Amino acid sequence: MQLLAIAIGSIIIAAAFNLFLIPHEVLSSGLSGISMIFGMLTPIDTGLANFLLNFPLLVLGYKKLGRKFITNTMVSVVIISLGLSVIPVYEFAHNTILSSIFGGALAGLGIGLILRESASSGGLDIIAMLVSRKKDFPIGTLLSAMNGVIIAFSGFLFNWDTALNTLVSIFVTGKVIDGVYTHHVKLTLMIITTKGDEMREQLVENVYRGLTVLDAMGGYSSQQRNILMTVITRYELAEVKSLIKQVDPHAFVNITKTVEVVGLFHRPTT
């Protein structure tokens, strides 16, 4: 189901670009917008440009965000790149402003769906994820702030009407992302398992959060167990549940919504 959601979100993004944004020379955010510029001004295919521009950031993300996150992101980048190459560029709506709004909303929906499944669509999403993990800011707002250069490019390369339509599209995309991907919601997990060491290793390796391990004993069975407690963001829940199930399908997991976190929320980097 996770890969299916990522695939659906990626196809939505590619459709938003080729059916609403590119026909009106309206750019998307981040590296996707730069890929569009290559596709509009050079013979380079937009999908190929999107993949090549994303590759260095995928390497960076692998080192900082974890193997599973980047693996899912690579799936998304490949599907988006193929979608941009396969889906025909067609002017679905003739009104430029409506196309900018609706195309931006569709792109935001697709990106939000992907982010909810512990992945990203690549590009500046990876940089925004790194910054948001350090500073805990809304990721849609971060993406909008980092896209000023795309708007400037649009104005100088095309015209300032196009730049303003690009601004509208990026703004709508950011708002929809923040509506779909509520990453700032915190959850506390208490995991009770007989495979404490293996569970700890998997969580430390794949989840960018601190972890506390306690010794415990089953009240009914008197069997020795471990309690692992951690606080994660809502977007990480799907990945953590998958990891828990892989290590110990019989683990007891209590998930509660956290009102506030005081102290060290991010795992130390040293």
Image: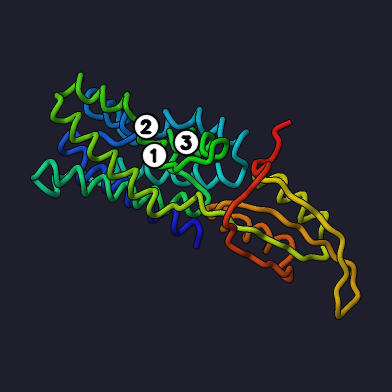
Dot placed on the residue nearer the N-terminal end, 3 or 2: 3
Name the amino acid, label 1: Thr
Which percent across, then down, holds residue 147? Answer: 34, 30
Q: Of helix, strand and loop, which one carries label 2?
A: helix
Name the amino acid, label 3: Ala
Q: Are marks 1 and 2 in contact (CB under 8 Å)?
A: yes
* Residue ID at (50%, 30%): 57
* Residue ID at (59%, 52%): 260
CA separation in Å, label 1 and label 3: 9 Å
Which percent across, then down, holds residue 38? Answer: 28, 26
| Extreme residue in the left direction | 94
Residue 117 higher or lower than 37, as above or below: below
Q: Is residue 77 visible?
A: no
Find disc 3 in the rendering and name its residue.
Answer: 128
* Residue ID at (31%, 32%): 33
Q: Of helix, strand and loop, which one carries label 1?
A: helix
Q: Is residue 78 visible?
A: yes
What label does residue 47 carry, if any? none
Find residue 248 and report its image quarter.
Answer: bottom right
